[in-house]
């Protein structure tokens, strides 16, 4: 009888031990699973975040600056230019690269013609644009202003002096009613013209009437792209690549400039 009791007790003890072992095994398995899951998640986050921030770092290291294309020349029947391009000096700005706008505006007011009225007008325009979109601060700088800007450029972040082209017409204006004129691209222009949306860059001007408007698509040209490396403060440190773009087509018309003077 004692023998049976001892055997029963031993079997009960063994069963309980096996049950505890199974529970410990299951619990250990769950713990290991949770631990592996956490480690895997941390590893994934580390890798994905590293890729993300490396991508952002590369984006911040490089900048692309789109340049206005050279508009085609319009000539009269004898080859006299009635719509041409002339060199002009401009100042462009990328808002997201400017640490302090008010400080920049103050410095500009000491170098170029940038009064309170122009400051308010620029701020109004900035509100309608994205921070990464370049904007023209001034499109008609004098040579002394342009030179001085380049001299003090190291003190100003987010701005870029640019040598650009402006439209020039015959001085007597005898063909102005036929040739027309150019002006900045409007929101309405972009909404109604698909090809214009593809080439639009800051400072681009298109024909609004006359031949300038009629020939728009053929004489507007293709914008250039300048790619350069910047430091952590957005200051350009090295030019990497330059695509100069394509000038628009030149056109010779049947207009006689001399005859137009008498009409």
Image (spheres, rainbow, N blue to C red):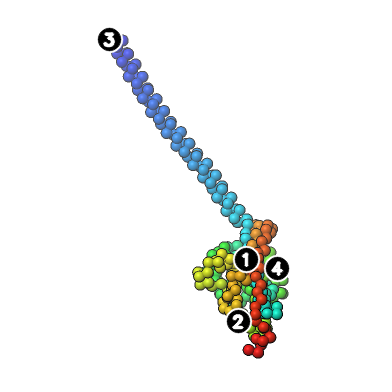
Question: Dot 3, how many residues are within 10 Å of its Cα: few (below 14), some (14-19), or many (20+)?
Answer: few
- For marks 2 and 3, give the one nearer the viewer: 2
| Above/below status of 171 relative to 251 | below
Q: In whole angstroms, how far apart are the C-alphas of marks 4 and 3?
A: 109 Å
Q: At x 53% / y 69%, what residue is drawn?
A: 193
Q: Which mark is residue 222?
A: 1
**Image location (x, y in percent) of residue 244:** 67, 63
For marks 4 and 3 on the same chain, the one whose residue lies earlier in the sequence = 3
Task: Mark 3 or mark 1: name the one nearer the start of the chain.
Answer: 3
Residue 153: x %, y % from top left: 68, 66
Q: Which residue is mark 4?
A: 150
User: Is residue 13 shown left or right of residue 31?
Assistant: left
Q: Quadrant of the N terminus?
A: top left
Q: Mark 1 or mark 2: which comes first in sequence?
A: 2
Residue at 50% across, 39% down: 39
Q: Of helix, strand and loop, which one carries label 2?
A: helix
Q: Is residue 48 visible?
A: yes
Question: Sequence-wise, which precedes: disc 4 or disc 2?
Answer: 4
Question: Which label belongs to residue 1?
Answer: 3
The residue identified by callout 2 is: 178
| Closer to us: 6 or 211 | 211
């Amino acid at each position: 009888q004692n023998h049976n009791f001892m055997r029963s007790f031993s079997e009960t003890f063994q069963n309980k031990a096996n049950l505890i072992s199974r529970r410990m095994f299951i619990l250990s398995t769950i713990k290991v699973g949770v631990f592996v899951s956490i480690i895997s998640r941390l590893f994934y986050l580390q890798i994905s975040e590293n890729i993300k921030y490396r991508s952002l770092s590369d984006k911040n290291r490089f900048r692309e600056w789109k340049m206005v294309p050279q508009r085609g020349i319009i000539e009269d029947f004898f080859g006299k230019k009635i719509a041409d391009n002339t060199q002009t000096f401009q100042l462009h700005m990328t808002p997201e690269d400017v640490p302090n706008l008010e400080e920049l505006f103050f410095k500009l007011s000491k170098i170029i013609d940038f009064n309170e009225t122009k400051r308010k007008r620029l701020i109004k325009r900035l509100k309608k644009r994205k921070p990464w979109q370049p904007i023209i601060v001034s499109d008609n700088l004098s040579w002394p202003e342009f030179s001085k800007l380049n001299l003090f450029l190291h003190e100003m972040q987010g701005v870029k002096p640019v040598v650009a082209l402006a439209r020039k017409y015959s001085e007597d204006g005898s063909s102005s009613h036929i040739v027309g004129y150019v002006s900045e691209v409007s929101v309405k222009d972009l909404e109604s013209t698909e090809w214009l949306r593809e080439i639009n860059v800051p400072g681009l001007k298109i024909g609004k009437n006359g031949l300038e408007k009629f020939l728009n698509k053929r004489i507007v040209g293709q914008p250039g792209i300048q790619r350069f490396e910047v430091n952590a403060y957005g200051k350009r440190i090295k030019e990497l690549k330059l695509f100069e773009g394509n000038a628009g087509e030149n056109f010779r018309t049947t207009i006689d400039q001399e005859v137009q003077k008498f009409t």
